Image: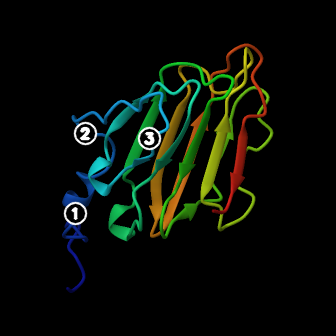
């Protein structure tokens, strides 16, 4: 392709790519308060999920092996109840993926606010009795930022005074 004219689309797939970002009209399934692991697929990009996990231990795996074509695609999880006592939510970036250094985890009492290493691919959020950091209304946003990488943003609405609920590791 030669030098494009003023106003000419320089990326012929630009419109198609723009239409595949953000959120669509189809809701994700409700994540139940049980121990059944959930593995999301690329078909889940653009969906919002609700999570009713309060006292069980659940693992959620994000779509595996994201590529440059997935950049900008997102998944959002809304916590509908407070994660308490024995409740543990594990979020894995899944096969072939890690967390961007631009990931952030914010909430009352939380001391781990970013991943410590480039290879980190697991976040564990642990509930607490009456002072849980991951209360109802907390959110998790996972966005693909490059091939093999997610930016994870966790905004925590505490129950009580919150807690040091977040641990980040490499699985």
Q: Which residue is mark 3?
A: 36
From this view, report whether residue 146 is shown above or below residue 60: below
Q: Nearer the viewer, residue 76 or 127?
A: 127
Residue 117, image x, y percentages = 72, 64
Q: Which residue is mark 1?
A: 7
* Secondary element at tag 3: loop
At 74% from the left and 18% from the top, the residue drawn is: 131
Q: Which mark is residue 24?
A: 2
From this view, report whether residue 170 is shown above or below residue 28: below
Residue 45, image x, y percentages = 32, 49
Q: Nearer the viewer, residue 44 or 126?
A: 126
From this view, report whether residue 59 is shown above or below residue 10: above
Q: Is residue 69 left or right of residue 2?
A: right
Q: Earlier in the sequence, mark 3 or mark 2?
A: 2
Spatial CA span between label 3 and label 2: 26 Å
Q: How many marks?
A: 3
CA neighbours of label 1 inside 10 A, class few (<14), some (14 to 19), many (20+): few
Q: Earlier in the sequence, mark 2 or mark 1?
A: 1
């Amino acid at each position: 392709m030669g030098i494009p004219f003023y106003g000419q689309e320089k990326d012929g797939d630009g419109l198609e790519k723009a239409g595949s970002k953000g959120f669509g009209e189809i809701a994700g399934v409700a994540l139940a308060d049980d121990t059944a692991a959930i593995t999301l697929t690329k078909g889940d990009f653009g969906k919002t999920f609700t999570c009713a996990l309060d006292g069980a231990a659940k693992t959620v795996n994000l779509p595996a092996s994201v590529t440059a074509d997935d950049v900008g695609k997102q998944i959002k999880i809304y916590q509908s109840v407070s994660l308490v006592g024995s409740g543990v939510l594990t979020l894995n970036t899944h096969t072939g993926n890690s967390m961007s250094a631009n990931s952030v985890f914010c909430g009352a009492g939380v001391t781990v606010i970013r991943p410590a290493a480039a290879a980190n691919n697991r976040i564990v959020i642990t509930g607490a009795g009456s002072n849980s950091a991951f209360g109802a209304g907390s959110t998790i946003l996972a966005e693909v930022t490059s091939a093999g990488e997610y930016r994870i943003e966790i905004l925590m609405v505490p129950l009580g005074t919150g807690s040091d609920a977040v641990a980040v590791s490499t699985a």
